[in-house]
Each structure stands twice: as structure tokens, then as C-alpha cells.
Amino acid sequence: MSTRYVLGLGGTVDYEIAWTPDVLDRLVAEHAITPDELDVHVPIGSERDLLRTLLAFVRDGVGGERFVASSDIVAAFAGHFPVRVTLGGTCVRAAIAMDVLGLASTVHLVSIDDHVRRLLPASTSYLCSAESDSLDPHLIVQFPAGTTIRVGSDEVVAPHPNRIIYVNDPPNRELLLHPGLPDAMADADVVLVSGFNVIQDAETLEHRLADVRKGLQRLAPGALAYFEDAGYHVPALARRVRDELSGLVDVYAMNEDELQSWLGRTVDLLDADDVAAALVELASVVPAPTRVVHTKHWALAHGGDAERYRAPLLGGITMAGTRYVHGDGFTPDDYAATGTTTPQPEGVAFAAALESVLPSAVCVPAFALDTAAPTTIGLGDTFVGGFLAAAGRA
């Protein structure tokens, strides 16, 4: 019998803009933005505010997700650039990645429109809680390393490639769940939970957690429950999700940004002693059976069942690496080719050192990948798809 995957909790329609420095130079000049105004934390109530945060992200070479006061701001800003419409959300991108390997899944959606119907893989079925069509696009901005934008008398230069997400999405903010979701979860072999980070109201969160709890408590023996953490629009709500889900899921996963957010400090991702100390600290903060952390250098599992996830970690790294090089539309042959690529030397050294100093951790190095046009959008979501695909086949 084939593995039954149920992936939740919400998908998105994404407007991916083409990075166009001359347009950005023009917008910076039109809005008279000065270097001292760049701030990733400023509330985004206008195109000007969005641009201030975008330039700050580029300056720092980091990614993130920010709430925007209106979807109109997203649409207006996207209107300055060439735009490609894609599907996003952790569950949907994971399903798309798994479809490449011939794996069917069921996704849970909270909104739908003709973009979703057109772009969702034919192998992917869905439950949708929406009673009518709606469109609240997410703005996805991907920038390359070394890109330069003139800001007043200064230049902003990106030290690393990355991506930023700008969003005002009422259906995902409400995250209304389909009444059939608990039954679907009860029949599943692998369940993905994600998407709580967009909720901004504590009472709404409590209702959604209660609904998901019903499904998780009905999982069959041996079924895998995986939670993917994210950047919360209301950071205080992350603790409530942790309190509820740490004891209900098998894997509590995150990237390096969420790791550092939980610890309240930066972590040197290539220093085995620093990461080992961070993992020990994280275990007390997020007491799930196994914690997974995925980065551009490596992916690891830490906890009592860590060794069980060595192959899924490699599956996740391979899938994310394939997307990094090939973007959307990669093939099974692309995936297979990525798996034969030489691992990053620094990642190999780190993985060996970490497993030596922290035997309760399993670490798999990322691949040494070189491309002139890397895709940084959706790598974490694609990692999840690769991880779950391999876990379901184990």
C-alpha cells in the first residue's frame, strides 16, 4: 500500500517579482529614501515602508517574512516589476516537490482561486475550508549576492542571496480548518502541520490548535507527525504553539532563523561546539521528541530518535539543493543528479565534528552547488517535501 500523506495547513498564491536593480534605484529616488531609514522592523503601511525594509534585508543579506497593512500595497509594488505567479505555502510547495518523485498527497487549503486550480499538481488532492474564491497574493522578492542599489550617497550591496516575503492574507490569518481534516489525518501515514505563524489573534490560535490536536491524537500507531516552524507575525504566539505541539508531534523542525529566534542569540553555523551548545539549549526550550534544523550548510536531527531521520535529512537536502539550482520545474533526473554531487567540504567537517561532540545528533552536509542564478524561494518548504518523501519510503 502506498504511503498516505496529508499536508497542512494553508497554501498561497505568490507573486514572484523579477529582481530589477534599475527599477529599485528609481523607486528609492522617487521616495527619497536615505540610508538611515533602512529598517527591517518598521511597520509596513505603504510602498515606501516596504521599500525601506526590503533594502535593509538586502543590506544584511538575510531573509524573512513581514506583514503588510494591505494586499493593495503588495499588488502596487509588484506592479513595478515583471511578475511570475506561483503557488506557495509550506504544504503546497512540499506537495509539488513530492509530486516530482511520483508521490501523491492531500493538502489542506484555506483559500482557492483559478491560479490554485491551474497550478496544483494533478496528483495532489485537497480539502479546502473556503466557501468562495479569493486572492490575497504574497509578494516574494528574491535577490542575488552582490546586487547593488543606490540609496542616497550610499550603496546597498547584498552579501548573500536570500528572499523576503510580504503578506496580508486574511484566509491564512484566520486559518479556518475543513471539518474533514481530523478524519484525513487519522487515515494518514505522514502528516505535516504548518502555517500557524500567520495567525495574529490568540483566541483564533486556540481554536485552530484544538482542531489540529483532535487530528494528531487520532494518528495511527507508527504514523509520522512533522511540524515546520516559521517566523511569527506575532512572536509571542510561537510559544503557545510550542507548548501545544511539542508533545504531539514526532519532529519539530525549523531553519537557522527560527533556531536563533528561540535562543535569542546568533549561532555560528560552522562551529560544532557552538551548534552543539545551541541544540542542548533548544532541547530545553522546545522539548519535542526530535528537533530538526535545516540550513544552507547542513541539516540535522537532535533527540532520542535522531538516527531514524538520517535518510530523510538527506532527502530534504537533495530536494532543496535541486530547487536551488533548477528552480521550479525540476525533474526526477535533476533530483538524482543532485544526489551525486560532492558535499560541501565545510559541511562534511562540521557534520563529523558535531556528531563527535554531541552523539545525540545526526547531521548531513549540504551539497556544493554552483549556479549563476540560484533559487532561494521556497527552499525550506522544498526541504520539507524531500524529508517527508524519504520518511514515507523508510
Image (tube, rainbow, N blue to C red):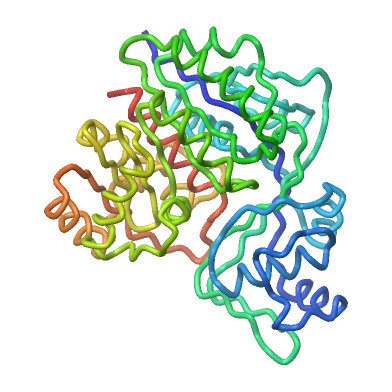
Q: Position of residue 138 (x, y in %)?
A: 72, 46
Residue 131 against residue 226 in the figure, above or below: above
Residue 182 against residue 234 in the figure, above or below: above
Quadrant of residue 385 within the rendered picture: top left
* Residue appearing at x 33%, y 27% in the figure: 391
Q: Nearer the viewer, residue 328 or 133?
A: 133
With 8 as the anchor, is 243 left or right in this view? left
With 340 as the anchor, is 380 left or right in this view? right
Q: Work out which residue is located at the far left of the displayed protein and give it.
A: 356
Q: Position of residue 116 (x, y in %)?
A: 71, 30
Q: Nearer the viewer, residue 60 or 41?
A: 41
Residue 81 against residue 92 in the figure, above or below: below
* Residue appearing at x 54%, y 64% in the figure: 62
Q: Position of residue 233 (x, y in %)?
A: 64, 47
* Residue appearing at x 56%, y 74% in the figure: 158
Q: Nearer the viewer, residue 374 or 380?
A: 380
